[in-house]
Image: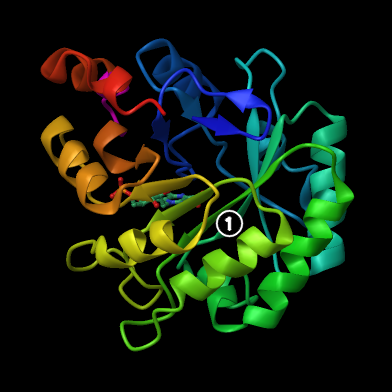
Amino acid sequence: MKIGRHELDNALILAPMAGVTDVTFRKLCRRLGAGYTVSEMLTSNTQLWNSDKSRLRRIHLDEPSPRSIQIVGSDPKQLAYAAQLNAEHGADIIDINMGCPAKKVCKVAAGSALLANESLVAEILASVVAAVDVPVTLKIRTGSDPDHRNGVRIAQIAEECGIQMLAVHGRTRACRFFGEAEYETIRLIKQQVSIPVAANGDITSPEKAKKVLAFTNADAIMLGRAAQGRPWTGVQHRVVHGSFAKSITI
Ligand SMILES: Cc1cc2nc3c(=O)[nH]c(=O)nc-3n(C[C@H](O)[C@H](O)[C@H](O)COP(=O)(O)O)c2cc1C
């Protein structure tokens, strides 16, 4: 699979997880089978970048390429500036977080709270894409709540704005981590856009990954909690399914 000019080693992606997927863990997962990883979310407010937490979340040049950094915020200009600085500091790809349901993120109208405001989504995406020469990707949930699943519309906006890969967690903002992820919205999104789509949510085994890929026709699988404490999950996927990683490489 390709993100802009970057050809991934395989289509198995480690999901960004704040407090879990730090640079050491990401490097370990790449070595053990993940084709691509994304950093923990970093605030777009550069005034907060001097803290130890933000310093550790920023780009690390000893990480294998392509290095992707995820930014979170709600102000288009602030996000564009944060993207620019990260690209200058060595980010190969900028990822925008519109999937986080955490209260401290949503109360400042960032993360998954943005899904309810399609015009602001468009403004943010256009502003970040225009600010950098590197590919920009987006991570979303399927909508605000089960009655407002506008994931397809958001995906179309993303494509129109020049986003080069979309990762979709099959839950809404309101669903947080409750219940089971659904893949129907991811399937519909994949039908409606031509940019690569990564399916995410509750994928815990190679068998489940195969099923989700077959159902959604997604270009990649993104694993989060299944890899937590188990960085060798990528190898397991290969071992259990033989050519699994190869078979999902586009
Ligand atoms: C501890 C934890 C931290 C997370 N942090 C982030 C984050 O920084 N950025 C983001 O986009 N998603 C974040 N997520 C969501 C995951 O990337 C993923 O979408 C979610 O866990 C569903 O995938 P899974 O079922 O494979 O875990 C986090 C999830 C967990 C459990």
The answer to whether mark 1 is within 8 Å of ligand 1 is yes
**What's the amino acid at mark 1?**
Asn
At 80% from the left and 67% from the top, the residue drawn is 76
Observer-nearest residue: 205 or 161? 161
Q: How many callouts does the rendering have?
A: 1
Q: Position of residue 78 (x, y in %)?
A: 84, 61
Q: Position of residue 9 (x, y in %)?
A: 47, 17
At 75% from the left and 66% from the top, the residue drawn is 124
Q: Position of residue 77 (x, y in %)?
A: 87, 64
Give the magenta range: 228-234
State yes or no: residue 230 in magenta.
yes
At 40% from the left and 60% from the top, the residue drawn is 191
Categorize mark 1 by other alpha carbons within 10 Å: few (<14), some (14-19), many (20+): many
- Disc 1 is placed on an element classified as strand
Q: Position of residue 44 (x, y in %)?
A: 75, 55
For disc 1, the marked residue is: 97
Residue 250, by quadrant, is top left
State yes or no: residue 15 in magenta.
no
